[in-house]
Amino acid sequence: MPGSKLSLPLNEQIVLVTGGARGLGAHITRAFQREGARVIVNYFRSAEAAAALAAQAPDRTLAVAADVRDARAVQAMVDRAQQHFGAPVSTVVNNALPEFQFNGDQRPHADALSWENLSQQMEGTLRGALNTVQATLPGMRGAGFGRVINVGTNLFQNPVVPYHDYTAAKAALLSFTRTLSHDLGPDGITVNMVSGGLLRTTDASAATPEAVFELIAGSTPLRRVTTPAEFADALLFFASPWSRSVTGQNLVVDGGLVHN
């Protein structure tokens, strides 16, 4: 598309990180802060954690509460960010995770799985991504540049623990990633996914038994479990100029456990 930009340095980007105040999201926020980007730390209930992250780079970070399942709240957050920074959001990281714990003993098994379990994950994961993309799309199109990076999982390639609800929602998000990449590519907007395995340690994986961490570590070529900071660093690639010709892709970051 005429006028579209192939790339934008990280330190010139305005990055929205959903669920960016704690767990993996906090590592993603810090990774972009480190590279000089302006960051919107979206949070739902973690106001104190969001404020602490914003204080680490107060001139370049804005903490905003919004439920990503609520389209009007997301639009209000994006409008506030544009007013605050004087430019539209250029990059969206869809990281927000509906309430979930990686504990195989407590997961809903096939005979007890309800549609409510599936819907709860779909609402936060897929509807959340739809809302952030639609709210930021006019600004990205106007700028001729945009990056959408969705956080996925390697469980739909290797369901070592069958978390039906979580995995189904992330698989839907991968499909959405690929269809969006076709729709938005002519506007200079790339859409990619970064998929992790079990990370050591996030809020969601804190309930994982030690034996599972040991099993995963022993099965990977690197013989260790990926950290949230390592995952966040890999995610930066899709926002950086080096990925300007990459879209619709799913990068698995799990120490080599799963081959995409």
Image: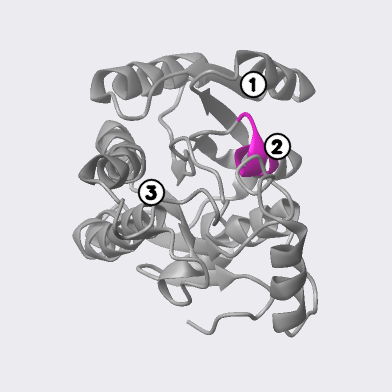
Q: Does the magenta stretch include residue 23?
A: yes
Residue 53 at what x, y percent from top left?
A: 71, 25
Q: Does the magenta stretch include residue 190?
A: no
Give 197 or 192, whichever is nearer the viewer.
197
Q: Which of marks 3 and 1 is nearer the N terminus?
A: 1
The nearer-to-camera label among 3 and 1 is 1
In this rendering, would 257 be left or right of 151?
Answer: right
The kind of residue tagged 2 is Gln
Residue 245 at what x, y percent from top left?
A: 43, 71
Q: What element carries label 1?
A: helix
Give residue 187's mark. Answer: none
**Residue at point 29%, 57% (across, down):** 111
Give 162 or 88, whichever is nearer the viewer.
162
Give residue 50's mark. Answer: 1
- Residue under circle 2? 33
Residue 113 appearing in the image: yes
**Over which residues does the magenta segment extend?**
21-27
The kind of residue tagged 1 is Ala
